[in-house]
Image: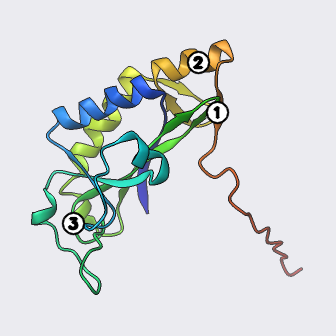
């Protein structure tokens, strides 16, 4: 299971969110400790998934062979699919707190809730997409300068027909 909040952000919205994350004492970390710097716009577009952590990489418990992977069931991490804007598309992202290992997720739950409260206070909720939209993104959508794009757009979908016995 997980708790999550979906977000839609233009560039200034993302910078404001990143600034709040940083001012909260939190860090952005790559999915693997051998990944390049994840704190640049180019990498955000190519690798939108990362973690938000209260601990630096050196204090985490990597696994694998070689041990370069990190996980939110081992260490207190928030999975962050970063939103981005490639005109005319605004692609949604999410902040996700994995609750499958409650003893781990409780160590970062307060930070997740603080981020969620900030987003809810500062961004507009758009029911049609079940997400919160930053001020610049909202302006772009309202003026027709941008359109919403699901992060799942282009992902193949398999349909399964379920039958029940009579």
Is 59 in front, or is 159? 59
Residue marked by disc 1 = 148
Q: Are marks 2 and 3 in contact (CB under 8 Å)?
A: no
Q: How is the image coloured?
A: rainbow
Residue marked by disc 2 = 140
Q: Looking at the image, is mark 2 or mark 3 earlier in the sequence?
A: 3
Tag 2, which secondary structure? helix
Q: Position of residue 112 (x, y in %)?
A: 28, 45
Q: Position of residue 88 (x, y in %)?
A: 65, 29
Q: Which mark is residue 75?
A: 3
Q: CA distance from mark 2 to mark 3?
A: 37 Å
Query: In this rendering, which labeled residue sits more in front, label 2 or label 3?
Result: 2
Q: CA distance from mark 2 to mark 1?
A: 10 Å
Residue located 62% across and 36% down the image = 129
Q: Position of residue 51 (x, y in %)?
A: 31, 55
Near mark 2 (Cα within 10 A), the count class, few <14, some 14-19 or many ≥20, is some
Tag 1, which secondary structure? strand
> Which corner quadrant of the image does residue 31 belong to?
bottom left
- Tell me how many marks there are: 3
Q: Are marks 2 and 1 in contact (CB under 8 Å)?
A: no
Looking at the image, residue 4 lies above or below residue 14: below
Position of the N terminus, as image quadrant, is: bottom left
Q: Looking at the image, is mark 2 or mark 1 earlier in the sequence?
A: 2
Near mark 1 (Cα within 10 A), the count class, few <14, some 14-19 or many ≥20, is some
Position of the C terminus, as image quadrant, is: bottom right
View extreme (bottom): residue: 65
Q: Looking at the image, is mark 3 or mark 1 earlier in the sequence?
A: 3
Asked whether, in this view, residue 132 is left or right of residue 56, the answer is: right
């Amino acid at each position: 299971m997980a708790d999550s909040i979906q977000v839609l952000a233009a560039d200034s919205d993302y910078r404001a969110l990143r600034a709040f994350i940083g001012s909260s004492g939190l860090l952005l970390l790559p999915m693997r400790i051998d990944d390049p710097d994840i704190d640049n716009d180019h990498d955000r577009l190519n690798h939108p998934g990362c973690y938000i952590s209260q601990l630096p990489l050196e204090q985490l418990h990597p696994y694998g062979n070689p041990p370069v992977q990190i996980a939110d069931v081992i260490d207190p991490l928030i999975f962050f699919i970063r939103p981005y804007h490639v005109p005319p598309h605004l692609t949604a992202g999410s902040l996700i707190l994995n609750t499958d290992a409650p003893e781990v997720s409780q160590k970062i739950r307060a930070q997740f809730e603080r981020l969620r409260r900030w987003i809810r206070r500062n961004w507009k909720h758009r029911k049609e997409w079940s997400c919160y939209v930053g001020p610049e993104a909202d302006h772009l959508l309202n003026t027709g300068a941008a359109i919403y794009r699901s992060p799942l757009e282009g992902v193949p979908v398999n349909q399964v027909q379920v039958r029940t016995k009579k």
